[in-house]
């Protein structure tokens, strides 16, 4: 096996079990490995540190797999890691009210570059690193055996592939082709998911617990007027309607996504135990920044606003612009809230730390002339775990603010 030798003093992160080695930490490579091969990693004195997958085309030149010198990277290794990941989701598997969740969360499950999401009887898989694509057949076989899905569908179509020297790959991997829309359940609600073309792998699974938190809070505010910005297919709106909101406005750039948002409200009528109610709905296909300004000009006000924008910062160079974008939408939202209203605001940009995000929201409230309290902090669900040695996995952060 070829060996990656680190520069003096660059071994500390590896010893602390961070799963990435950047190119600047590498002194030289012994042997003639191909990119994608498994290599050993040793410190400047030649002491064994770990074993991982090499890719000199990426800034992350090695993605580490094991710190055990005796552990062999073979088909049995991948199966053990998958077994561990699936066992951690056993409570979700046993929950009949939910049929969609993440089964494998890449580095945080010891499987760098592998994402597996369950949507009912189907699995949607992303192979996002060169090294993990080398083991695609073994991983597909193990997933078929362990999870017994009706079919596996590949959605390796994200920007990070270019950094790995890979090209997008989509299509059926095994079993049956999923339908154009897969019906799922989430906390008892019904949704339709486009696993072939939808955002991420089709649905924002990481927001499941946050949607439930919204529902709990809005239950104490019957008759609320709710604004869901960046609504996608309207999942937050369904939870708001179930909490007896009186009016829900949803803004989304995609008219096709809004069509699903309409269907989702129809698919989830009020429970028989709830009193009859009239629900007014607005579905606005447009730019969120422009629509929020229009609402302000019209003196519109809301009791609760959800801001769940797409990733604004894909690189460090985009961070200043992303910061301005987050501040702008939060500034507008604070101006649209009634006194005592709630703002559920999120950032999924990993480069925006929780501390920075709080400062952005604070600045937005200050500029809007509003006093605000943080009454809740939100993150991704437990099926999107964060490895303690890999804080970068905590990409989703959210605040629940009450404005006065």
Image (cartoon, helix red, strand yellow):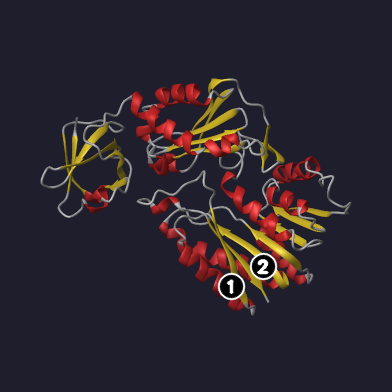
Q: Is residue 287 visible?
A: no
Residue at screen point 68% across, 66% down? 342
Asked if 188 appears above or below 125 in the picture, the reply is: below
Q: Is residue 135 visible?
A: yes
Asked if 363 appears above or below 234 in the picture, the reply is: below
Whole-number angstrom distance, CA of label 2 to CA of label 1? 9 Å
275 sits to left or right of 82: right
Which of 276 and 282 lies nearest the eye of the viewer? 276
Q: Residue furthest top?
A: 175
Residue 64 location, x and y as percent?
30, 40
Which of 186 and 34 lies nearest the eye of the viewer? 186
Residue 264 location, x and y as percent?
75, 42
93 sits to left or right of 244: left
**SS under mark 1:** helix
First in sequence: mark 2 vs mark 1:
2
Residue 99 location, x and y as percent?
63, 35
172 sits to left or right of 82: right
Residue at screen point 65% across, 65% down? 343
Asked if 117 appears above or below 233 in the picture, the reply is: above
**SS under mark 2:** helix
Near mark 2 (Cα within 10 A), the count class, few <14, some 14-19 or many ≥20, is many
Q: Are marks 2 and 1 in contact (CB under 8 Å)?
A: yes
**Residue position for label 1:** 364
> What number is the disc on residue 333?
2
Residue 321 location, x and y as percent?
50, 63
């Amino acid at each position: 096996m070829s060996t990656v030798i680190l520069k003096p003093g660059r071994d500390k992160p590896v010893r602390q079990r961070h799963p990435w080695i950047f190119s600047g930490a590498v002194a030289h490579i012994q042997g003639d490995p191909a990119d994608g091969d498994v290599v050993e990693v040793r410190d400047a004195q030649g002491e064994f540190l770990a074993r991982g997958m090499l890719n000199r085309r990426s800034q992350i030149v090695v993605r580490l797999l094991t710190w055990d010198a005796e552990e062999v990277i073979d088909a049995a290794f991948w199966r053990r890691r998958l077994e561990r990941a699936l066992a951690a989701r056993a409570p979700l598997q046993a929950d009949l009210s939910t049929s969609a969740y993440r089964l494998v969360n890449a580095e945080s499950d010891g499987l760098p570059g592998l994402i597996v999401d369950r949507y009912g009887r189907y699995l949607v898989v992303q192979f996002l690193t060169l090294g993990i694509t080398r083991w695609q057949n073994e991983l597909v076989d193990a997933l078929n055996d362990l999870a017994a899905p009706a079919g596996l569908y590949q959605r390796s179509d994200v920007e990070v592939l270019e950094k790995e020297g890979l090209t997008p790959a989509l299509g059926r991997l095994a079993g049956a082709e999923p339908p154009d829309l897969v019906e799922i359940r989430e906390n008892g609600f019904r949704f339709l998911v486009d696993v072939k073309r939808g955002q991420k792998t089709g649905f924002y699974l990481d927001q499941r617990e946050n949607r439930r938190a919204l529902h709990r809070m809005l239950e104490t505010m019957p008759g609320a007027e709710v604004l869901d910005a960046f609504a996608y297919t309207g999942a937050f709106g369904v939870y708001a309607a179930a909490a007896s909101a009186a009016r829900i406005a949803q803004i989304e750039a995609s008219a096709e996504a809004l069509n699903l948002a309409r269907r989702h409200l129809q698919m989830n009528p009020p429970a028989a135990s709830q009193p009859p109610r009239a629900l007014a709905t607005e579905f606005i296909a447009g730019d969120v920044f422009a629509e929020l300004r229009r609402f302000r000009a019209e003196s519109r006000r809301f009791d609760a606003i959800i801001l769940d924008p797409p990733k604004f910062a894909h690189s460090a160079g985009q961070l200043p612009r992303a910061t301005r974008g987050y501040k702008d939408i939060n500034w507008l939202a604070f101006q649209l809230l009634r006194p005592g209203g709630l703002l559920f605001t999120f950032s999924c940009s990993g480069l925006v730390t929780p501390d920075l995000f709080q400062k952005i929201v604070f600045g937005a409230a200050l500029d809007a002339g509003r006093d605000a309290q943080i009454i809740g902090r939100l993150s991704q669900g437990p099926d999107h775990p964060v490895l303690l040695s890999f804080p970068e996995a905590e990409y989703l952060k959210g605040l629940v603010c009450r404005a006065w």
